[in-house]
Image (cartoon, rainbow, N blue to C red):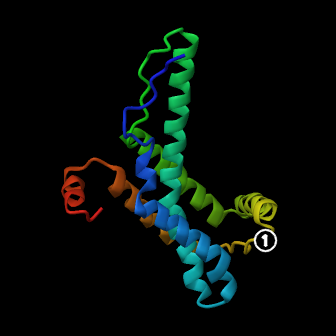
Amino acid sequence: MKTKILGPGRIPGRFFLSPLYLGSIVVLVANNFWFKHSGICPVLAGKLSDIAIMIFLPALISVGVLFLRYVRDWLSAVFEGDPDRQIDFPDRPSKSTLIAALIVSGALMTAMKTSDTAMEIYYQSLNFLNTALLGRTIARPVKDYTDLVSLLFLAVPWLHLSEAPLISRWRRFRLL
């Protein structure tokens, strides 16, 4: 099979490798492993995680959707007997994918911060993964309605990934 996957020099989902998202992952990991356990300014430590999640999660969901679409197109090419079909992995998500990712991210954060059941599911699943992979437990999340302020940071991935004319000008000057 000679399915053409990507053009030369193309990195699938390269927007996800932006310093913005990589930086939010670093903040999230450092915050959960060191800052929260150090006891230094626990209010700020809790907010940092929420802000990092609101920047990182929509991009992660968008990459997941793009990957699933890519797999669907690849399987379609294989089963239709068209191995030379060009299968494209877009550089950035479509507006509808981005909006859906933002809505899902906001809904998850809202549920986690307002529902005891959702918070417990989040804690148990993340704690299980963390204990299995790293041998450490995570700090138990606290139900705090002020953490919903982090929803404002959903504007960051929107500004970074949308194709608004103002944003294009900002990118030219490397502000975003």
| Secondary-structure class at tag 1 | loop
| Visible residue check, residue 144 | no
Please give left or right for residue 57 compared with residue 176 in the image. right
Q: Is residue 108 above or below residue 83?
A: below
Please give left or right for residue 101 compared with residue 171 in the image. right
Quarter of image, res 26: bottom right
Give amino acid for label 1.
Answer: Arg
Quarter of image, res 44: bottom right
- The total of numbered circles placed on residues is 1
Residue where numbered disc 1 is placed: 136
- Return the x and y of residue 76 as percentages of the image width and height: 54, 17
**Quarter holding the C terminus?**
bottom left
Q: Residues within 10 Å of mark 1 (few under 14, many from 20)?
A: few
- Return the x and y of residue 39 as percentages of the image width and height: 66, 89
- Return the x and y of residue 70 as percentages of the image width and height: 50, 30
Image point 55% across, 34% down: which residue? 68
**Quarter holding the N terminus?**
top right
Quarter of image, res 166: bottom left
